[in-house]
Image: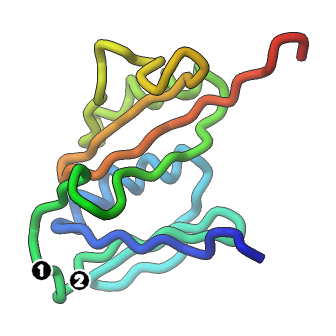
């Protein structure tokens, strides 16, 4: 009880979103679940994520700095995996945010890659770090 059931993200261009998000979700262990003309979904355990180019969109532009969802943060494995994903991401339409502070843009104890896709959606790829003494 209380865990996240699903997230639905409305995108302005499903083909472009499928290229970027489909690659990233696959790399993170999510599996494709459903496909229909206006959408796709991926599942990881009990949680699924939907990308949909809805006919009811009120705008074709996403602004992560406006009220609403700023970003999704994913567990991405150890730092070398985060580094590999950040390196490969531009091939799939992602750009590195906060490059001057990468990989510690979230602070000295937060090894992560912050990416934005061509539609302006942001993801945070959080590295798993072992505590000192582990």
Q: Residue at x 33, y 78 (%)?
A: 39
Q: How far apart are the alpha carbons under marks 1 and 2?
A: 9 Å
Q: Residue at x 59, y 38 (%)?
A: 76
Q: Position of residue 31 (x, y in %)?
A: 58, 62
**Badge 2: how crowded within 10 Å, few (<14), some, or many (20+)?**
some
Please tell me which residue lies in front, 50 or 16. 50
Question: Where is mark 1, residue-wise?
Answer: 58
Q: Residue at x 50, y 28 (%)?
A: 112
Dot 1: element: loop
User: Which of the 4 image quarters holds residue 50?
Assistant: bottom left
Dot 2: element: loop
Q: Residue furthest right?
A: 133
Question: Where is mark 2, residue-wise?
Answer: 54
Please tell me which residue lies in front, 109 or 88. 109
Q: Residue furthest front?
A: 67
Q: The N terminus is located in which quarter?
A: bottom right
Q: Position of residue 45 (x, y in %)?
A: 71, 66
Vertical placement of 1 versus 99: above or below? below
Given this view, does label 1 or label 2 mark the residue nearer the observer? 1
31 with respect to 84 (left or right): right
Vertical placement of 64 versus 124: above or below? below
**Badge 1: how crowded within 10 Å, few (<14), some, or many (20+)?**
few
């Amino acid at each position: 009880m209380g865990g996240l059931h699903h997230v639905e993200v409305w995108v302005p261009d499903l083909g472009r979103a499928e290229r970027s998000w489909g690659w990233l979700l696959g790399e993170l262990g999510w599996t494709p679940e459903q496909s229909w003309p206006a959408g796709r979904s991926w599942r990881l355990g009990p949680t699924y994520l939907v990308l949909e180019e809805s006919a009811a969109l009120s705008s074709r532009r996403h602004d992560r700095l406006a009220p609403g969802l700023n970003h999704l943060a994913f567990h991405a494995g150890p730092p070398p995996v985060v580094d590999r994903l950040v390196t490969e991401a531009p091939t799939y339409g992602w750009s590195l945010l906060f490059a001057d502070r990468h990989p510690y843009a979230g602070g000295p104890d937060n090894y992560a890659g912050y990416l934005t896709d061509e539609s302006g959606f942001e993801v945070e790829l959080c590295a798993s770090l072992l505590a000192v003494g582990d």
